[in-house]
């Protein structure tokens, strides 16, 4: 028998971090469709993250991307976040949007460019010191497009050097999470193409360095839950960038393309103790809402993660283990599929009532009239976004 109150207790403390960049305008390389009511600066992005938290109760932090969210005083931004009921989460350096980075950032063959990229990473550690953020999320667009373009080995050495300098700057409970991505923007080699490369660097770096799994960064057919299980077992799973993909790095809403995959990932998290705070697994979203309204899309995404987690918590682990031990393939599989088939919405509605929030977060947001308010308040000035 599953203890429903234990399930609710686990869900109550699961924190899902939203990304500041998901609140701004975004698009593909073909077109950015401007939306109304979009935040104009980091303060307003924080306000929107606070709105998502108000309606879901489980999204108490927002990740920042530097320099997209650069402000004069990060202490003041942290204070503003606190006043709105949220905190500032992971800091994401951006070393991919300047002309200097044509041949890469920390792996660039040019010393001066490498130094510039490293300085930005170190500046982000300084920002963490002010915001109180625990995690530095590192994603490098570095790689090559053509065979022979640069030395694969030398680039790995440059990467190690930069990572170890950053690692030495971390203090307290600070960590660095190293994200990998199979391809794009480089198409021949990426310098951190897969979890194995990230894992090897993180092992070298020691306990502060962990792997960040962005669910959209794998080849089609990759068994992501295997990676999750392996890394968690080795104490090297730093966290997730959740999103959905149909083709490439689509950045669609998590749980939209393949809710069963999300469930299977959360099953490995639950079985491996990854929901315990001591496991240090950060549940973050990394999405772009190009055609759908942003705040409701983020509410939907948070709910999707929560639903998958609830279903994973409903797996009858005793029955699963017994079936596995008996070699009963069908019963073992049924332990998972039964949990996946359970409608967890009534349980989550109850949980929300216990938490003092509306049981229907999306409906409540729509009824609140909040969107009309921000649309009017943000009529003037330039919306934040990629501006492509
Ligand atoms: C990358 C990667 C990073 C994100 C950027 C915007 O593909 O997922 O995490 O910060 O996109
Ligand atoms: Mn990502
Ligand atoms: Mn991505």
Image (tube, rainbow, N blue to C red):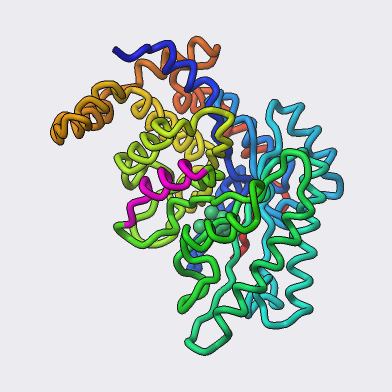
Res 33 seen here: no
Tell me which corner region of the image, top left, top right, bottom left or bottom right, holds residue 61: top right
Please report the bounds of the magenta region as a residue range: 222-234
Q: Using the image as rendered, state which of residue 338 and residue 238 is in the foreground.
A: 238
Q: Residue at x 70, y 55 (%)?
A: 68
Question: Is residue 182 placed above or below 361 in the rendered structure?
Answer: below
Question: Is residue 109 placed above or below 58 in the rendered structure?
Answer: below
**Which corner quadrant holds the N terminus?**
top left
Q: Main secondary structure of the magenta part?
A: helix
Question: Is residue 103 placed above or below 148 in the rendered structure?
Answer: above
Count all numbered tags in the image, as a single digit: 0
Q: Using the image as rendered, state which of residue 170 and residue 44 is in the foreground.
A: 170
**Which corner quadrant holds the C terminus?**
bottom right
Question: Residue 224 magenta-drawn?
Answer: yes
Q: Give the image location of residue 228, x and y in percent.
A: 43, 45
Tell me which corner region of the image, top left, top right, bottom left or bottom right, holds residue 370: top right
Q: Give the image location of residue 235, x and y in percent.
A: 53, 42
Q: Residue at x 81, y 44 (%)?
A: 129
Res 212 seen here: yes
Q: Using the image as rendered, state which of residue 8 and residue 168 is in the foreground.
A: 168
Q: Using the image as rendered, state which of residue 331 and residue 147 is in the foreground.
A: 331
Q: Residue furthest front?
A: 325
Q: Give the image location of residue 322, x and y in percent.
A: 22, 25
201 left or right of 247 in image: right
Question: Residue 275 magenta-drawn?
Answer: no
Tell me which corner region of the image, top left, top right, bottom left or bottom right, holds residue 18: top right
336 left or right of 155 in image: left
Q: Give the image location of residue 247, x and y in percent.
A: 35, 61
Q: Residue at x 47, y 47 (%)?
A: 231
């Amino acid at each position: 028998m599953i203890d429903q109150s234990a399930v609710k207790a686990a869900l109550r403390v699961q924190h899902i971090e939203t990304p500041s960049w998901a609140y701004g305008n975004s698009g593909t390389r073909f077109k950015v469709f401007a939306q109304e009511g979009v935040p104009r600066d980091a303060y307003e992005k924080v306000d929107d993250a606070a709105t998502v938290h108000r309606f879901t109760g489980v999204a108490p932090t927002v990740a920042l991307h530097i320099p997209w969210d650069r402000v004069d005083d990060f202490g003041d931004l942290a204070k503003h976040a606190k006043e709105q009921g949220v905190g500032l989460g992971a800091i994401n350096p951006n070393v991919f949007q300047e002309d200097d980075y044509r041949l890469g950032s920390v792996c660039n063959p040019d010393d001066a460019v490498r130094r510039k990229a490293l300085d930005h990473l170190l500046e982000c550690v300084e920002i963490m010191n002010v915001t109180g953020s625990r995690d530095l999320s590192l994603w490098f667009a570095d790689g090559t497009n053509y065979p022979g373009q640069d030395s694969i080995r030398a680039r790995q050495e440059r990467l190690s050097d930069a990572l170890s300098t950053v690692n030495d700057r971390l203090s307290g409970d600070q960590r660095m999470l190293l994200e990998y991505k199979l391809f794009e923007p480089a198409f021949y080699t990426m310098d951190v193409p897969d979890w194995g490369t990230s894992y090897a660097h993180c092992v070298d770096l020691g306990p502060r360095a962990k792997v960040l799994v962005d669910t959209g960064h794998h080849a089609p057919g990759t068994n992501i839950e295997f990676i999750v299980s392996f890394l968690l077992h080795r104490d090297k799973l730093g966290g997730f960038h959740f999103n959905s993909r149909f083709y490439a790095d689509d950045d669609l809403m998590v749980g939209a393309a393949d809710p069963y995959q999300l469930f299977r990932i959360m099953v490995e998290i639950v079985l491996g103790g990854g929901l315990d705070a001591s496991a240090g697994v950060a549940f973050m979203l990394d999405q772009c809402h190009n055609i759908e309204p942003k705040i409701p899309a983020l509410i939907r995404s948070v709910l999707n993660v929560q639903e998958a987690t609830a279903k994973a918590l409903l797996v009858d682990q005793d029955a699963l283990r017994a079936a596995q031990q008996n070699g009963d393939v069908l019963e073992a599989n049924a332990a998972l599929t039964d949990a996946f088939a359970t409608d967890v919405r009534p349980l989550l509605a109850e949980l929300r009532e216990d938490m003092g929030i509306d049981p229907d977060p999306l409906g409540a947001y729509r009824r609140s009239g909040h969107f009309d308010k921000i649309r009017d308040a943000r009529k003037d000035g330039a919306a934040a976004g990629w501006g492509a």
